[in-house]
Image (spheres, coloured by chain):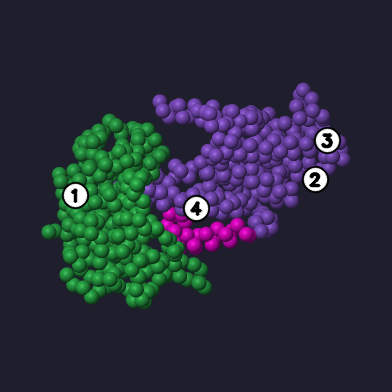
Amino acid sequence: MKKVNTVKSLIYDLFKDYRFVVAFIIICIFILLVILSFFSPYNPQRMYQVPSGLPPSFKYPLGTNWLGQDVFWQLTFAVKNSLIIALVTAFFSRIIAVIIGILAGYKGGTTDRVITTIGDTTMVLPFLIILIAISMILKDWTNNFFNLGILLAFFSWAWDARVIRSQVLSLREREFVKVAVLSGMPTIRIIRKQLLPHVLPIVFTTFINNMSWAIGMEITLAYLGLGIDPTVPTIGTMLQTAIYRQALFMGLWWWLLTPIVTAILLFVALYWISVSLSEYLDPRARFQRIGFGK
Amino acid sequence: MEKVLEVKNLKKIYSIGSIFSKVKITAVDNVSFYINKAETFTLAGESGCGKTTTAKIILGFEEPTSGDIIIEDKPIQKNKFQDFRKKVQAVFQNPFESFNPLLTIDDIFYETVFNYKMAKNKSHAEEIINEKLKAVGLSFDEINGRYPTELSGGQLQRASIARSLLTNPSILIADEPVSMVDASLRMSIVNLFSKLKKETGLSVLYITHDLATAYYVSERIAIMFRGNIVEMGPVDKVLIHPKHPYTQLLIESIPEADPDKKWKRKISIADTEYTEYLKTGCKFAGRCQNVMETCKKEEPKEVTVDNVIVKCHLYNGRRA
């Protein structure tokens, strides 16, 4: 009963923030697109299935492109695939960040120093150049969602591991952790039961940030003709194909604009969700916005 | 009398600063004391005098630089740490911090009982928990399924004491257990310690800066200053007839509820904690009224005067 009430008040507080509401609606629309992709009448990789170069109409909501593909149905696949890459990246980098952050924070000493050094090294690597180099050399390996996701995850765990480490460093000194040690709990259980619930809010907000970072990186790589196979629609490859096939010169603005608007909407939605969530989780910021009187 | 806990020549050195300017601070310097069965021993002193560090070392949260800790005639062994944890339990300062705010209070009680394999099933565990909670004046229904924010500070501190009693420890380390609860509850918790001592023969290491409750609850007392025990002995001798100038200063700084009485001595803080720790000779020399030339050079030796161990040059020539 109590749990239900907390969830209720959490949703109530979050929906007070217009940014969260807008972001939530956008994300819902994108999820709808993902679901629609399973009912697509066309194979996204085949060309010349519809008349090419038609402007948006009732039959083709977002028009068709020069390759004879329906842009709307292409978009449904693109959103799905981009989100898969983002989720894989965020999921794996979160796992690395949580394990490493907690280990460094809780163990301290030499373990901490070694791990922090590795993390700092990863952080200062010029990751864009390395990503380009790797995806050029291992072109066949990086052209599926899962491998690209893992590659991106490897470059994005360090910042958040640092945040989690600092959180655990302060948690470790709190009395309830000492009481847990005195109650004979093994270290693994202390981490899982006493520390992890306190760290989870950070994991959630950084998860969303990491997703938008991964989408951005995928677009960057695709624009350079790297990463995912260009015939597989993602937001990045859609954009790349449109630019490569000179959509603008041919006046097919809907072809070019669709991935751009989608990317912007997705970034805004993810950013607003992460901001409103972290503001909700930080009591000082929350009080500034909704006031003390609640 | 049986010694439950004995601390021998305990030393803890912290290194501060970078590689180029390392400064070693001896937070606990050759501290030795013992606690008998069914006895309350107080470790008193101002903030930053090393009393909490001593407690942390005894609890195994910090590694001592040197020295031994002997529990019931057995030194602590690393491989039998679980047995040792069962014998030494602690109550901390802040009752609101002693329980995880995201878990219910009964959770840590069950954890303690099952981790030390004291009960086989849940109903047996509940029996043990209820028994200990009754000893501190609570009942199981008051904590069952409740979060720490739902209880008052006094209730939480009692619950915290009950949790530490679950394993039937031979010694309880109480690190400023009453400094965060208000005055009326302070007495009830101090009385609880006396009651437990009488009924179950519990030994308590009572760490505090509050000399009034220390006098009330304990048999023997040690006054710490900058890592050293400067005076140790029976509580009525140390607190009624203080010998070390620092103890005298401490007792004079207890304010009395009488507007006509002014504080006699002006308390001057000439040095920072840091410089006092680095002093050679007597660390109190910077503030002492009876300071002599030798105080600044030589570290005073322990002298027994009238059943009380004093570490001061004033008593060097004398023998009781």
Label located before the other in sequence (3 or 2):
2
Image quarter in which the N terminus of chain B is found: bottom left
Percent x, y of residue B123:
22, 34
Residue under mark 3: which chain is it in? Answer: A
Callout 4 amino acid: Arg
Q: Is residue A250 left or right of residue B300?
A: right
Q: Residue at left 29%, top 32%?
A: B142
Q: Which chain carries label 4?
A: A
Residue farthest left in this picture: B1
Chain coloured green: which letter?
Answer: B
Q: Which amino acid does the dot numbered 2 rest on?
A: Tyr
**Mark 4 — residue?**
A165
Q: Kindly identify the amino acid type of the residue bearing the numbered disc 3.
A: Leu
Chain letter, purple in picture? A
The tag earlier along the polypeptide, 2 or 4, is 4
Q: Which amino acid does label 1 sit on?
A: Leu
**Residue B98, numbered label:** none
Q: Which residue is drawn at 34% across and 40% down?
A: B182
Foreground: B190 or B248?
B248
Q: Can residue A35 be seen in this view?
A: no
Q: Distance between the residues labelled 2 and 4?
A: 44 Å
**Residue A244 circle label:** 2
Check disc 3 and report its element: helix, strand or loop. Answer: loop
Element class at badge 4: helix
Q: Provide the residue designation for mark 1.
A: B202
Residue A104 falls inside the magenta stretch: yes
- The reply to whether label 4 and label 1 mark residues of one chain is no
Q: Residues within 10 Å of mark 3 (few under 14, many from 20)?
A: many
Instruction: Quote the CA–CA distance across marks 3 and 2.
Output: 13 Å
